[in-house]
Amino acid sequence: MSETSTFDFNAFIKESKETLVNPKAYFSTMKTSGGWAEPLIKVVIYGAVAGIIVFLWNVLGLSGLKTGMFGGAIGAMALVWSIVGAVIGLFIGAVILLIISSVCKGNTDFEANGRVIAASMVIMPINALLGFTSGISSWLGMIISLGVSLYALYITYHGLVESLKAKPETAKIVMYILAALLVLFMLLGMSTRNKMNKYMNSEDLKEMLKDIEQQ
């Protein structure tokens, strides 16, 4: 019988809660081997849930991104790309974490690192759920998103130390550096978001759409 057919959804829910509430305890007992089916199923579920939430926020106009007539289409694409992005993110994240683990003298087994990344991606639905704050205020959304991302680093830190047996001191330094980069990227992302909102509501775009409809 294949591994996918024995996937325990109840255990998945329990592990997801444990990862969020008590990551240190979860990662200290997490299996670091057993095949890729389980972590793949995990990230697909996380990506799907996050995508559905983003889709709903777009339909309700609470995403903070003023997409006008494109709102529904963009929301639907967000659902698809959330799943695709989660799967791609699993493998890219595993490579990045493997490098970090190597620097921190931890486990460099690719699957072990992938399992830590898969567990850490439990933050995806949480980030999507809180996405409505951007519809209230772009600055509030940015602060909330930054807080969620920093908590994701906190979860990953425990994965590094508890599951991958990395040196805590080195791992902390790496996490501080990544946290600083997150703040920088959030500020840059905010600037880009504002420019996109202005473009989507610009008179030039509206005129262009009118010309297309008349043709």
Image (spheres, helix red, strand yellow):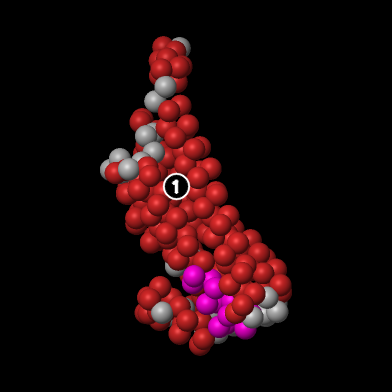
Other-residue count near label 1 (Cα within 10 Å), few / some / many at <14 / 14–19 / ≥20: many
Asked whether residue 35 is in view, the answer is no
Which quadrant of the figure contains the N terminus? bottom right
Residue shown at 55% from the left, 83% from the top: 162
Q: Is residue 178 left or right of residue 20?
A: right
Per the image, label 1 sits on a secondary structure element best described as helix
170 over 182 or under it: above or below: below
Residue shown at 47% from the left, 62% from the top: 150
For residue 87, which quarter of the picture? bottom right
Q: Amino acid at mark 1?
A: Ala
Q: Is residue 214 left or right of residue 178?
A: left
164 over 184 or under it: above or below: below
Q: Which residue is mark 1?
A: 78
Q: Is residue 61 left or right of residue 169?
A: left
> Which segment is the magenta one?
154-166
As for residue 157 lying within the magenta part, the answer is yes
Residue shown at 42% from the left, 59% from the top: 147
28 over 147 or under it: above or below: below
Camera-nearest residue between 123 and 6: 123
Camera-nearest residue between 95 and 186: 186
Which quadrant of the figure contains the C terminus? top left
Task: Where is residue 185? Give x, y as percent.
Answer: 55, 49
